[in-house]
Image (tube, grey):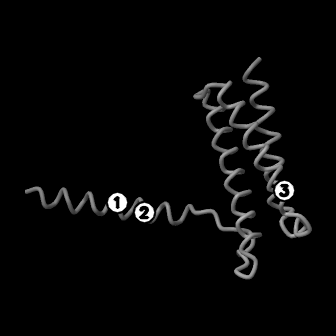
Amino acid sequence: MAQPNIQSHLQNIRNLAQQRQQQRIPLNTLLDPTNPVQSFLELRMAIITARLATIQAHIQQKNTDLAGAMTQISRLKMQGDELERNMGTKKKDYRHLIEVYKQGLKIVQEMLREAMI
C-alpha cells in the first residue's frame, strides 16, 4: 500500500529537480580554463552579487535584523572592492560583473536606509 506513495514522492522530487534545472542562471561569459585566477575572481563577484540580492529580498519582506543586514552589506562591500582591485588589468573584460555588483550594492544600501526610517 505504501508503494504508490513512494512513487508519487519520487516523481515530485524529479519534478522539483527539473524545475530547478530550468531556473539556473547562465553565466554571461564562459570561464577561461587558461586563467583560473581570473575565473575564480569572476565567480566570487557573482557570489557577492547573489548575496546582496538575498539581503535585498529579506529587507523587502521585512524579515531581517537591520543591524545584521548593515554588517553583512559592509562586509560584502569590502570583499567586492577587494575583488575589483584584484581583477587589475582584466577589469574591462569583467565590467558587466562589476557594474551589476555596484548597482546591487547601491540598491541594497538605499533600501536599508529607507527601512531604518
Q: Residue visible at 62% across and 26% down? A: 62
The crowd level at tag 2 (other Cα within 10 Å; few <14, some 14-19, many 20+) is few
- Res 61 → quadrant: top right
Q: On the image, numbered disc 1 is attached to which residue?
A: 13
Q: Residue at x 81, y 32 (%)?
A: 110
Helix, strand or loop under label 2:
helix
- Front position in the image: 28 or 47: 47
In the image shown, does 83 or 29 lie closer to the viewer?
Answer: 83
Q: Amino acid at mark 1?
A: Ile
- Where does the C terminus fall, quadrant-wise? top right
Q: Say whether marks 2 and 1 touch (CB < 8 Å).
A: yes
Residue 4 horizontal/vertical position (percent): 16, 60
Q: Is residue 98 above or below residue 115?
A: below
Residue located beneath label 2 in the image? 17
Image mark for residue 84: 3
- Quarter where residue 16 is shown: bottom left
Q: Is residue 98 above or below residue 60?
A: below
In the image, residue 7 lies at what x, y percent? 22, 63
User: Residue, x 68% and y 24% (percent of image)?
Assistant: 67
For the residues labelled 2 and 1, the Cα–Cα distance comes to 6 Å
Q: CA distance from mark 1 to mark 3?
A: 40 Å
**Dot 3 or dot 2, earlier in sequence:** 2
- Image quadrant holding the N terminus, namely bottom left
